[in-house]
Image (spheres, grey):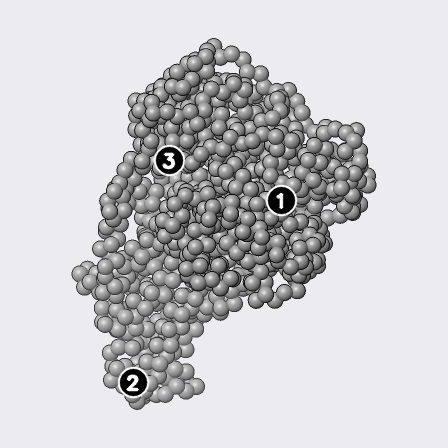
């Protein structure tokens, strides 16, 4: 055989890419800032016991509604509980509910989206009609209905039904986006090659198609964490989410905070800022991640 | 006003412009760099050439050689942030383009020089009428009123051969075919009566018969209106027929330039010589094996010293390590090779890979694949108006392929050749007809039999960029079928087999760890071949397997396919639109048109004594890389375009474009008949 093995000198490897994290920091400064906020939030959520100066449930009638000071950085609420500590514990609630509900909703949505695009025809039509129904309701309304219908199912201190209630409205939104991306993957010759090789449907969906729609999936996942945190805060505010005395940001805005916020604006200022900051950070991070993962933005 | 009068009128206008002396365009020592995250890519390094008024100059080169970047530099259309011209001078009609500000440059662009792009499908705005798009430059640059601009637009459409121009002005791009859109693009390019038109691969996306029409049109217009034309292309045949002068680029530099005749007949640079040798040609007897240029072009992001072509050059000598200038040649051109006089005198000949050819033995065995009356209809959904229809993509197609044989399948786009391939691969369900593979009827086969057939029938796709999963390594791509079909036991054995397959297709075993984007086009196509081979197939569908590759790489892959065929006794169905490539590789050839087989015969019969008028037209339209032959023959231009699939012609599908068509042809569907032993054609006139 005289098949030419190309000369080694012309087959040089491209310059080794810098570490993905270094590259991300260089290309996405805003994304990096939001990532720092997210990390801080996660740190506070995971190590609440170590970080928080007080017990979030400890009632201290001696210092009811005291203004922010060196003792109480963010002041205290109507029961004299330290707001700073409640915010730190609240980030745990927000993260657990925000992350799990977004993860569940996005993942099921993504799998349905890829399957819908792969099979097409009748299967696609049916999945889409179900998604149409789910999409007809605003996120918060649909979540409200689900919570009201199913009640509570507490597992490990977290309300599983609350998580599902927030995950369900996220599902069709992710499904649509991933389906659109999967359609363009579906017509790629490498999918035809896999079909021509006689691989099973599950293999083609999970091995050949899903990895190629990971970018939109990750972006939607992070963006919907923000939405989920907001939904959790709203539901708690409406009294259908997390219940007193658990520390949760939305809950801190409701109840007697509404009665006292004129005298004690810190009651709503700090939880409000926390929610905004978290939503802002996750949204921005999702955006930066999209730009970073999209090869068209790469030089 | 007739077309000729319009032409006379325009020529008069052109000649009255100032500065008629001297060349129209002078490019002097042009350097273009791209600043990327991975460093500076020197895309063009020291290019110099001139273009005279009314002259056709071709810039030839493979992808990445810098030919398109040269054009963009002249038009000053480089990406604003990354593209830089650090050095050089571009004189256009006495003006230095690099010294103009954006505003002045905009006035020149579209008025004095215009550009025609490769993709006629996407270079027109789909939501604006053709009329508006032609009138736009006229109103912007020449300040014409609506009425004047419209009159001129009608004139222009006539000039580019579009009938019924008044009505067509109000139509949208989607109502035009690819060839017609390219005519519209030319009309827009001509609108302001420019002095120079740059056409970047103007016919690459078009079929051969349409390509001939468009090139003929451009050449005539250039002659008639005294417009200089720069054609950028990789197709040497196109260059031979239409160019006065040729510039051959290799790795950001000019390798050779000169008059077309001189460059083609006695190249003065080994790269040009290699290019001309490595393309299969219709005008030469079929060689046993293609001579190829081995290796790959250099990476422009890395600096290099010495001759850029030296690593691939069979004539390399010690002095080639040094930087070399452009040497003037005896024919008034230039060559960047120390040995240009020796090459010109024919003292040294191309001594690259050669070898034994294929012998086609007469087939006495049972066919590996038989297709009988294969038919595929697609139903098309109508829009809001609900007018759906049926597209008859493939009708009544029958053929046999024998073990170890290559059957070529040629035709223009939309003729159903790819659908035939997809039906055999069972990627589509046939509407009617039967496919027998190794004696098993696939439409009645059990799932187990189908699965066994999947292994034996494999495919190599056209596009090496999208046929490999970007998220899998080469090793995973090739290894996957080994594990799924349990061809190997365990990981160790799998890795060994992958390495063996890689070496079989001419890649090194370390490639297994790379991802597809780290490979070049040719290397990826080799991976695609290795993936197909992993299944140990007996039959491979090659769907345009080499058409996306550069000419020098194309030859390497064709040779590889032939070697593998000999080694493993593979049968190929080789689907392609390039007649010369099909001739080189096939034993028998099928010509398809509009879903039907027109002619089937042995290779030499099809190319030597074809009977069917469509085959003749097809062969006639294909340019060959030899200016003397090309300039001598008057192309028998085929009229019209492919009919609409929703309103197919009655009778013979070719009757709308056939030079022999009569009333009878519109009534009778001709049967595929054996006109001579082993030579079938579907035509009532022969």
At 42% across and 24% down in the image, what residue appears? Answer: B660
Using a 10 Å C-alpha cutoff, classify the residue at mark 2 as few (fewer than 14 neighbours), some (14 to 19) or many (20 or more). Answer: some
Q: Is B648 rendered above or below residue B598?
A: below
Label at residue B643: 3
Would you say residue B195 is visible in this rendering? yes
- Is residue B26 in view? no
Residue B285 spot, x, y in % from top left: 61, 22
Residue located farthest toward the right when viewing the structure as drawn: B319
Q: Which residue is mark 1?
A: B56
Observer-nearest residue: B609 or A110? Answer: B609
Sequence-wise first label, 1 or 3: 1
Give the camera-side residue of B313 and A16: B313
* Residue topped by disc 2: A261
Q: Does residue B589 sit above or below B419 in this rendering?
A: above
* SS at mark 1 in the image: strand
Would you say the residues marked 2 and 3 are in contact, meaning their CB atoms lie under 8 Å apart?
no
């Amino acid at each position: 055989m005289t098949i030419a093995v190309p000369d080694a000198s012309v087959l040089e490897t491209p310059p080794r890419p810098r570490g993905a994290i270094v590259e991300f920091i260089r290309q996405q400064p805003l994304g990096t800032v939001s990532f720092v906020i997210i990390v801080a939030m996660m740190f506070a959520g995971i190590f609440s016991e170590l970080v928080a100066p007080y017990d979030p449930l400890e009632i201290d009638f001696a210092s009811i509604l005291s203004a922010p000071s060196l003792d109480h950085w963010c002041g205290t609420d109507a029961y004299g509980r330290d707001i700073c500590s409640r915010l730190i514990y609240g980030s745990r609630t927000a993260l657990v509910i925000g992350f799990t509900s977004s993860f569940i909703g996005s993942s099921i949505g993504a799998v349905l989206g890829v399957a819908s695009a792969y099979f097409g025809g009748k299967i696609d039509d049916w999945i889409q009609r179900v998604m149409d129904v789910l999409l007809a309701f605003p996120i918060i309304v649909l979540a409200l209905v689900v919570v009201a219908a199913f009640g509570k199912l507490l597992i490990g201190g977290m309300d599983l039904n609350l998580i599902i209630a927030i995950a369900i409205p996220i599902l069709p939104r992710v499904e649509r986006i991933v389906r659109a991306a999967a359609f363009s993957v579906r017509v790629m010759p490498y999918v035809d090659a896999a079909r021509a090789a006689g691989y099973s449907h599950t293999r083609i969906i999970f091995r050949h198609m899903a990895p190629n729609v990971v970018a939109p999936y990750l972006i939607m996942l992070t963006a919907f964490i923000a939405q989920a945190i907001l939904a959790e805060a709203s539901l708690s505010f409406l009294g259908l989410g997390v219940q007193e005395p658990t520390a949760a940001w939305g809950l801190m805005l409701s109840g007697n905070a509404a009665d006292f916020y004129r005298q004690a604006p810190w009651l709503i200022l700090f939880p409000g800022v926390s929610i905004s900051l978290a939503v802002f950070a996750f949204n921005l991070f999702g955006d930066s991640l999209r730009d970073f993962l999209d090869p068209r933005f790469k030089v | 006003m007739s077309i000729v009068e319009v032409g006379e009128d325009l020529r008069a206008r052109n000649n009255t412009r100032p500065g008629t002396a001297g060349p129209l365009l002078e490019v002097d020592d042009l350097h273009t760099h791209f600043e990327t995250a991975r460093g500076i890519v020197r895309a063009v390094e020291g290019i110099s050439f001139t273009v005279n008024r009314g002259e056709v100059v071709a810039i030839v080169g493979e992808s990445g050689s810098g030919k398109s970047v040269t054009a963009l530099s002249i038009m000053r259309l480089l990406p604003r942030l990354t593209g830089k011209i650090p050095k050089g001078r571009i004189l256009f009609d006495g003006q230095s383009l690099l010294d103009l500000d954006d505003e002045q440059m905009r006035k020149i662009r579209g008025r004095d020089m215009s550009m025609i792009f490769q993709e006629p499908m996407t270079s027109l705005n789909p939501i604006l009428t053709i009329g508006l798009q032609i009138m736009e430059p006229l109103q912007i640059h020449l300040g014409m009123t609506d009425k004047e601009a419209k009159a001129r637009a009608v004139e222009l459409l006539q000039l580019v051969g579009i009938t019924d121009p008044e009505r067509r002005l109000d139509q949208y791009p989607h109502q035009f075919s690819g060839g017609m859109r390219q005519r519209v693009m030319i009309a827009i390019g001509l609108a302001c009566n420019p002095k120079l038109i740059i056409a970047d691969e103007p016919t690459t996306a078009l079929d051969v018969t349409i390509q001939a029409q468009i090139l003929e049109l451009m050449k005539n217009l250039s002659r008639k209106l005294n417009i200089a034309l720069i054609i950028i292309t990789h197709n040497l045949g196109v260059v031979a027929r239409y160019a006065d002068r040729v510039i051959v680029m290799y790795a950001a530099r000019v390798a050779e330039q000169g008059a077309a005749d001189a460059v083609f007949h006695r190249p003065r640079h080994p790269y040009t010589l290699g290019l001309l040798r490595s393309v299969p040609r219709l005008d030469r007897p079929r060689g046993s094996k293609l001579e190829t240029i081995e290796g790959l072009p250099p990476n422009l992001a890395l600096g290099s010293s010495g001759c850029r072509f030296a690593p691939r050059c069979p004539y390399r000598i010690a002095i080639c390590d040094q930087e070399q200038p452009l040497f003037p040649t005896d024919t008034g051109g230039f060559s960047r090779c120390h040995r240009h006089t020796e090459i010109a005198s024919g003292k040294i000949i191309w001594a690259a890979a050669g070898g034994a050819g294929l012998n086609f033995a007469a087939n006495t065995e049972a066919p590996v694949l038989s297709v009988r009356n294969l038919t595929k209809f697609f139903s098309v959904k109508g829009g809001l108006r609900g007018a759906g229809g049926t597209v008859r993509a493939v009708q009544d197609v029958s053929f046999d392929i024998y073990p170890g044989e290559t059957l070529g399948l040629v035709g223009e786009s939309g003729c159903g050749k790819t659908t035939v391939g997809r039906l055999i691969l069972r990627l589509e369900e046939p509407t009617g007809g039967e496919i027998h593979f190794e004696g098993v009827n696939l439409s009645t086969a059990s799932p187990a039999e189908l699965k066994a057939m999947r292994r034996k029938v494999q495919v190599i796709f056209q596009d090496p960029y999208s046929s490999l999963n970007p998220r899998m390594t080469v090793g995973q791509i090739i290894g996957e079928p080994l594990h799924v079909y349990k061809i190997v036991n365990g990981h160790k054995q799998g890795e060994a087999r992958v390495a063996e397959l890689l070496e079989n297709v001419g890649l090194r075993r370390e490639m297994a760890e790379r991802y597809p984007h780290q490979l070049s086009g040719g290397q990826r196509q080799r991976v695609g071949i290795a993936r197909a081979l992993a299944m140990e197939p007996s039959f491979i569908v090659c769907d345009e397997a080499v058409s996306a590759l550069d000419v020098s790489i194309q030859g390497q892959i064709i040779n590889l396919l032939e070697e593998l065929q000999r080694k493993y006794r593979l049968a190929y169905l080789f689907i392609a639109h390039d007649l010369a490539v099909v001739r080189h590789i096939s034993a028998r050839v099928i010509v398809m048109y509009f879903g039907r087989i027109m002619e089937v015969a042995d290779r030499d019969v099809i190319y030597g004594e074809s009977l069917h008028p469509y085959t003749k037209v097809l062969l006639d339209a294909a340019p060959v890389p030899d200016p003397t032959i090309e300039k001598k023959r008057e192309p028998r231009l085929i009229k019209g375009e492919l009919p609409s699939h929703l309103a197919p012609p009655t009778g013979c599908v070719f009757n709308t474009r056939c030079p022999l068509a009569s009333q009878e042809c519109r009534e009778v569907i001709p049967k595929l008949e054996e006109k001579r032993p082993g030579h079938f054609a579907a035509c009532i006139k022969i």
